[in-house]
Amino acid sequence: MNGLLVLPIAIPLVVATLALLFRRSSVMQRWIGVAGMLVLLVSVAILFRDVYVDGIQVLQLGNWQAPFGITLVADLLSMLMLAISAIMGLIIAVYSIYDIDKERERYGYYPLLHILLMGVNGSFLTGDIFNMYVWFEVMLIASFILLALGNSKNQLQGALKYVIINLFSSLLFLFGVAMLYGMTGTLNMADLAMRLPEVENTGLVTTVAMIFMVSFGVKAAIFPLFFWLPASYHTPPVAISAVFGGLLTKVGVYALIRVFTLLFTQDIGYTHTILLWVAGFTMVTGVLGAASHFEFRKILSFHIVSQIGYMIMGLAFNTALGLMGAIFYVLHNILAKSNLFLISGIAQRLTGTFELKQMGGLYKHYPILATLFLISAFALAGFPPLSGFWAKLSLVKAGLSIEAYVITAVAILVGLLTLFSMTKIWMTAFWAAVPEIGVPDHFGKMPLFGAGNLYIMVVPVMVVAGLIILVGFYAQPLLEVCLDAAEQLLNPSVYIEAVLGPQ
Amino acid sequence: MNSLILHTATRLMIGIIVLFSLFLFFRGHDEPGGGFIGGLVGAGAFTLYAIAFGSEATRAILRIDPITLIALGLVSLVISGIIPMFTFEPFLTGKWLFLELGESEFKLSTPLIFDIGVYLCVLGFILAVIFSLEEVK
Amino acid sequence: METILPILAGAIFASGVYLLLRQSVILTIIGIILISNAVNLALFSLGRITTENPPLIASGSVIPELPFANPLPQALILTAIVIGFGLLAFALALAYRSYKELGTVDQDTMLKDAEDTSSAIVTDSENNEKRNA
């Protein structure tokens, strides 16, 4: 029993409430937002220590004992995800100070951002499958509004696609939950893990597993369910794109990892083979989609899809090494991907556009920005010694160790194609000459630091780039934690015992 | 809406409906009722007023912005959750205080605070939706 | 009841999917409403339908009178209904805003021409520059 476990959910709720009460003052809202994220980060750090030292932590909400009440469970995977979401939350809260306009602040940007984070943290912590549905909805409703806030034409178009497909996938999720309840009479995930192997109708269990795969697959944007993502993620302001691109799809990946290691392990030969095929197609289609586009954020959106493929691949291997690679990949990808989105925002501020063909000369006038882009882009493509290299290396190693040569070859090839897209951005936006028409007057004159306050956007990007380098050079400790997390996942009895007590 | 019957009836009804919503609210927990249904009925009263006299007049008699109502509701939800944490019990554990007032017994509890929060949130949410739909032209 | 409810849920789900595939955004949203009701109905019937005592504890006793009905599916459905209510209110408002902004409810014409993405953001940055000036 660890009472602190509620903090990652309660703090964003309190902060959102405060921001709502002070909604007339945008200065207050900004400071509350940043301070709230700091407090959240500290509380997650304390919890991380508890979980790392003392093992899985459990809290029975309202003192209703499992499996009857709602249980919060923090294992190493949850804590790693919570830690990265708290770090990104802080980065985004600072970045938003400059990026988000007064209109959006007045209509509740900050409260929504914190409610979104509450939903994300709740999904990571909950040990109850219906409660996970509720947290998904909390997260979704906040993301719907963030996406549509501002009411511009293409935002509404993007929001419509996003809302309808996500509503449908949530209903599928709920239907899956209903089936599980009908079969086993319980909703607690640890209890489900014990009872599912006893269900006689194994075909039905596999059917439910597929319902969950489709539902979470829509949220994680895997092949062939990803089409909504590139159609909507490039429409809102950059800070929102970065949260969505960094965190939201990864919640889907987390849910997939959780249910396919804890609940649906009866028919691995069937479900995990499908996952492996899906992973391969996701990687390839995503990266090819990115190659065909010339809008900064659309390229990044397609890369989200392609990177999800790597994570699913690690999950489909179902070995400690594969899961370690998948978890490490999630962490690395949240850093690198969000950072690229944030950089695209700075580039847009300077050049006035997201269209690569109308950009140019960023390297000549802003070498620091160019360096930051190179660090993140090379990390994404998997260059040594940056974080992406270790992520890809561990996945490739995992693939070779179980002799899955084809998918490993695909993964390496997709890494090369990722590099191609990144080079495309580098060549046109950074290296090419400044275009003759359509460049705003302040281009080249507006400094990154000093007048114009652009440093509010640049400093968070530098921090994330620093983290990427740090993870790259000191990968070993983090890899070890990821391996511990993977071993916990492959040995569900520890999880079950922590929740339900010794069996 | 410009109808004399509706205007007169609304003025008479609104107090009764609000009273009924409070009745439903306090009846809750042991018997059917509670914050959610109470809040819905309360919102119904103000919605009726908004139909009869327009949203501006309704804002005037409500005196408090619906969004602030939601925020206050969330505050009391959080308070009801935090109270048991002072005695090192998990978040949201129900704590009860029984007061003997002459003949009758009066129960104060954290679920009551939670229910007040639900009432305010539901009332605020529905009114915010109704007002913004009414004010969009 | 055990046989009627699943068939009903299936029929509603099928009608919902049919509406989901129609051209008009409004019909799509109505389709989502139908599917959400079908799922709630499925959740209800998967929780086993029986004729038993209400799960209320009479004063003086500790457990309800046996055999009592399972209250959990109803609690779950209530939660799902409330969430669905909020989401649908939002979806309808969004469809209305889109209709006002784009002038049509036909999905093909509505969702086309989303290519020019830079203009909206640029005006935002202009706002910002004014603010920071």
Image: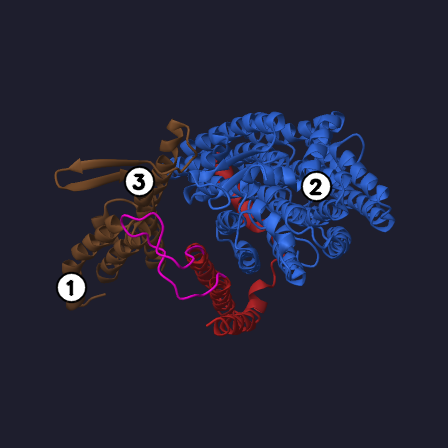
The CA span between labels 3 and 2 is: 42 Å
- Asked if badges 1 and 2 are on one and the same chain, I answer no
Task: Return the x and y of residue C124 as percentages of the image width and height.
Answer: 52, 44
Q: Does residue C47 appear to the left or right of A492 in the view shown?
A: left
Secondary structure, mark 1, is: helix
Q: Which mark is residue A490?
A: 2
| Residue A437 forms part of the magenta stretch | no
Judge whether residue C83 can be spotted in this image. Answer: no
Q: Tell which tag, 1 or 2, sits nearer the viewer.
A: 2
Q: Check the picture and name the quadrant holding the C terminus of chain A.
A: top right
Give the amino acid at mark 3.
Answer: Ile
| Circle 2 Cα neighbour tier, 10 Å, few/some/many (<14 / 14–19 / ≥20) | some
Amino acid at dot 1 = Ala
Q: Position of residue A378 (x, y in %)?
A: 76, 36
| Residue B9 - label | 1
Q: Main secondary structure of the magenta part?
A: loop
Q: Are marks 3 and 2 on the same chain?
A: no
Q: Which chain is brown?
A: B
Mark before the other along the chain sequence, 3 or 1 = 1
In the picture, which chain is red?
Answer: C
Three-letter amino acid code of the residue under disc 2: Leu
Q: Which mark is residue B113?
A: 3
Magenta stretch in the rendered image:
C47-72
**Mark 3 or 2, closer to the camera:** 2
Q: What shade does chain A have?
A: blue
Q: Mark 1 belongs to which subunit?
A: B
Q: Tag 2, which secondary structure? A: helix
> Can I make out residue A501 in this image?
yes
What residue sits 70% from the left and 38% below the top? Answer: A486
- Image coordinates for residue C94, horizontal then vertical, percent: 47, 58
